Amino acid sequence: MKFDDRYFKRFDFSKEQIEKNLQNAFKDFDIAVKDNILEVKFNYAYTSLIKAGITLLSFYKLKIKSVPGHHIKIIDKMSDILKNDTINEIGNAMRSKRNLDFYSGGIEVTEKECHEYIAFVKKALKDIQKHIKGNPEPSSY
């Protein structure tokens, strides 16, 4: 995938910044796991996924621009970098559901959906953490 300056800019993140981004994604994930309100669980799981993607991008010295469609690009890049099409499929399903909540009068999230989304985000977080730890000097992306 080629560099798209409409959505990204090059930025040299420090290791501390990357680690802080990852900790922030895990913090939101913990809230998703611990809260009892399904909509809260879902929203924090989605936010955790996006923050995990931002972490992965920061590892590759990419900073996302806040423009329409940037969540799609974060999910797409995560999927591409980790070579995992499931991230694109489920991540975009979560994004669409979140957009319905924002722009179409709310959503209803089932316990089963929450369980599946949380399991998916947990795996994505672990994969990103493993990817970052296993690649001390990434090539430019």
Image: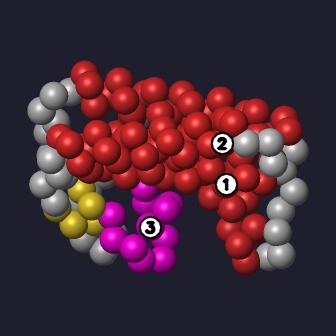
Residue under the image location 44 percent in, 67 percent down: 70
The residue singled out by tag 3 in the image is 70
Magenta segment, which residues?
64-75
Q: Is residue 83 left or right of residue 102?
A: left
Q: Identify which residue is drawn at 35% across, 47% down.
A: 21
* Residue at which label 2 appears: 32
**Mark 1 residue crowding within 10 angstroms, few (<14) / some (14–19) / many (20+):** many
The residue under label 2 is which amino acid type?
A: Ala
Q: Is residue 2 above or below residue 35?
A: below
Mark 3 burial class by Cα count in 10 Å: few <14, some 14-19, many 20+: some
Q: CA distance from mark 3 to mark 1?
A: 17 Å
Q: Earlier in the sequence, mark 1 or mark 2?
A: 2
- Answer whether labels 1 and 2 touch (C-beta < 8 Å): yes
For this rendering, which residue is in front, 85 or 67? 67
Tell me if residue 54 is in the magenta stretch. Answer: no
Quadrant location of residue 133?
Answer: top left
The image position of residue 84, as x and y in percent, is 48, 34
The answer to whether any part of residue 138 appears in the image is yes
Q: Are marks 2 and 3 in contact (CB under 8 Å)?
A: no
Q: Where, by quadrant of the figure, is residue 20 drawn?
A: top left
The residue depicted at 39 percent of the width and 33 percent of the height is 128
> Nearer the viewer's eye, disc 3 or disc 1?
1
Tag shown at residue 43: 1
Image vertical order of residue 113 relative to residue 105, above or below? above
Check whether the beta carbons of the residues at disc 3 and disc 1 lie within 8 A of each other. no
Q: Secondary structure at mark 1?
A: helix
Badge 2 or badge 3: first in the primary sequence: 2
Residue 37 as seen in the image, left or right of residue 88: right
Residue at 84%, 35% in the rendered image: 112
Disc 3 secondary structure class: helix
For discs 2 and 3, the disc positioned in front in the rendered view: 2
